[in-house]
Image (cartoon, rainbow, N blue to C red):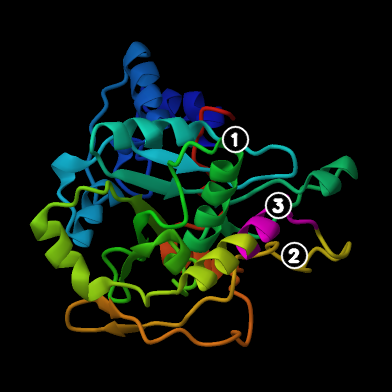
Amino acid sequence: MVEDSAEGIFGSAINSDVALLVVGDPLCATTHTDMMIRARKSGVKVEVVHNASVMGAIASTGLQLYQFGQTVSVPFFDGTWRPDSFYNKIKYNQGGSMHTLVLLDIKVKEPDFDAMGRNQKKFMPPRFMTVNQAIAQMLEVEEKRGEGVCCSHHMAIGCARLGQPTQQIVAGTLAELLLVDFGEPLHSVVLCHSELHELERDFLEPMRAPQVTNEQSIEAARLALEQVAQLTRPEKESEDEDEESDFGPVVPTPVHTESNTESNVVVPPPPVGQAEEKLKHEMDDDDVMELFGVSPSDFSGTIEDDDE
């Protein structure tokens, strides 16, 4: 983690110029704010070069940024570790007629603890949470809490690769979004408040997901709950260092969508049957370099959650 070597970073900056490159805007993460405070206490001058961030890019959904409440993070569930602090924040936002931006977990340079037990330094393949996985986990928490915050009929927006030519935005109920294939990372979700502004409704209309029947909605939610109940930290299938591990179960069969290249608005086709293969995101070092502009050896991180 970058904070573990923070003192070395700004310690070197006392007598020389040091730059820390991050994904997104540096002041959208509390880690970087903390580093700035510690650097200034050490007498290091800090300058910030701002960058594009999902916090602003989410306006591509047509939702008014002034109508957003607290941003929440959803981490990967792991066995019995299934934090739900995000649920209370979503509930708070809904009480104030506000939308909720949901950031999804990223695991890069995740230690292979089994290998560490054998005195071998290895890392798991990078993992990027999908819209489908996030919804499945939210539905599980809703089933446990039962306060009507993240129900399958609630309106939401799934986003993928915002700002890229392949940008994908699909609006629909949580049950409908479960059946959409959002493709490659990075993904995010917006939980909409029920009282959408007229302009917001008009903007989202061309982005609507294929509607599903009540029976399809119930079945999608049931399958999602069954599969997310099995979520755990991926394990190596062999001792081979080059062996890639599976990313665990995913939610019900995604529906492939076609993107309008001129407007970057998704025009989803009618629902189809079983997909030919389940959705995976297994990326090697070159893929991570292309996506982030840094190699896994230079970048490591995971979103923070109150329960961590």
Residue 187's x, y, as percent? 42, 60
- The numbered mark at residue 245 is 2
Q: Secondary structure at mark 3?
A: loop
Label 3 Cα neighbours within 10 Å, binned few <14 / some 14-19 / many ≥20: some
Please indicate, yes or no, whether residue 22 appears anywhere in the rendered image: no
Nearer the observer, 307 or 18: 307
Q: Are marks 1 and 2 in contact (CB under 8 Å)?
A: no
Question: Is residue 116 found left or right of 207 in the rendered image?
Answer: right
Residue 219's x, y, as percent? 59, 68
* Residue at 50 percent of width and 55 percent of height: 135
Specify the farthest residue to the top.
41
Please indicate, yes or no, whether residue 245 appears anywhere in the rendered image: yes
* Residue at 82 percent of width and 43 percent of height: 116
Amino acid type, residue under disc 2 in the picture? Ser
Label 2 Cα neighbours within 10 Å, binned few <14 / some 14-19 / many ≥20: some
Label 1 Cα neighbours within 10 Å, binned few <14 / some 14-19 / many ≥20: some
Residue 4's x, y, as percent? 56, 29
Q: Quadrant of the C terminus?
A: top right
Q: Secondary structure at mark 1?
A: loop
Looking at the rendered image, the disc whose residue lies closer to the viewer, 1 or 2, is 1
Membership of 168 in magenta stretch: no
Question: Is residue 218 found left or right of 57 in the rendered image?
Answer: right
Q: Which of the two labelled residues, at mark 2 and mark 3, occupies the earlier sequence position?
A: 3
Residue holding disc 3? 229
Q: Are marks 2 and 3 in contact (CB under 8 Å)?
A: no
Residue holding disc 1? 83
